């Protein structure tokens, strides 16, 4: 399960981040909207950045050569896109808007700038990414 904790992934990300880091993070986030059915993140692509879900629902799915699997749906207070940011690699899953979605988006460049000033942000995202990767590997 990707969100089996009582704390949202945004709350987890902000926990322990200094006030200046929180302020700079929120200042760097850009509001975006996606219609239902729009892909926010395509699997096996370069990082699209970090998305903080403000409204609506997204579905995380994995596409393998012979199989397509829906992993979970996430809603307000959750973040997606963290794995490819911290691993500096390709995205691991597809993220599609299931409803009209409002997000706050952090570009990969803005992320790089922020983690230079606030390394705690990278540590928090790595922790979240590790949890998500473990959950993606869980059977069933």
Image (tube, grey):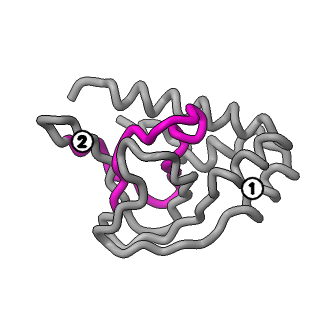
In the rendered view, tell whether residue 135 sits above or below residue 59: above
Choose between 103 and 112: the one closer to the eye: 112
Give how far apart the Cα atoms at labels 1 and 2 are: 31 Å
Of the 4 image quadrants, the one containing the N terminus is top left
The mark that comes first in sequence, 1 or 2, is 1
Secondary structure category for the residue under label 2: strand
Name the spot of residue 95 as percent of width and height, x first: 37, 53
* Region in magenta: 69-96
Report the residue that reaches farthest toward the left: 66
User: Would residue 32 appear left or right of 66 to someone viewing this image?
Assistant: right
Please tell me how crowded label 2 is: few (under 14), some (14-19), or many (20+) other residues with Cα within 10 Å.
some
To which quarter of the image does residue 134 belong? top left
Secondary structure category for the residue under label 1: helix
User: Would residue 58 appear left or right of 123 to someone viewing this image?
Assistant: left
Q: Mark 1 points at which residue?
A: 25
To which quarter of the image does residue 139 belong? top left
The label on residue 63 is 2
Magenta stretch encompasses residue 31 = no
Residue drawn at (47%, 69%), measured in percent from left and top? 55
């Amino acid at each position: 399960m990707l969100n089996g904790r009582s704390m949202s992934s945004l709350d987890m990300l902000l926990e322990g981040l200094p006030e200046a880091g929180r302020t700079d993070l929120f200042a760097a986030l850009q509001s975006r909207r996606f219609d239902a059915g729009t892909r926010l993140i395509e699997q096996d692509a370069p990082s699209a950045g970090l998305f903080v879900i403000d409204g609506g629902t997204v579905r995380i799915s994995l596409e393998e050569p012979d199989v397509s699997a829906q992993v979970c749906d996430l809603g307000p207070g959750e973040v997606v896109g963290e794995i490819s940011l911290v691993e500096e690699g390709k995205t691991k899953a597809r993220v599609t808007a299931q409803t009209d979605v409002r997000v706050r988006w952090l570009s990969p460049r803005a992320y790089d700038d922020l983690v230079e000033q606030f390394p705690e942000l990278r540590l928090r995202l790595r922790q979240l990414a590790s949890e998500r990767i473990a959950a993606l590997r869980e059977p069933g």
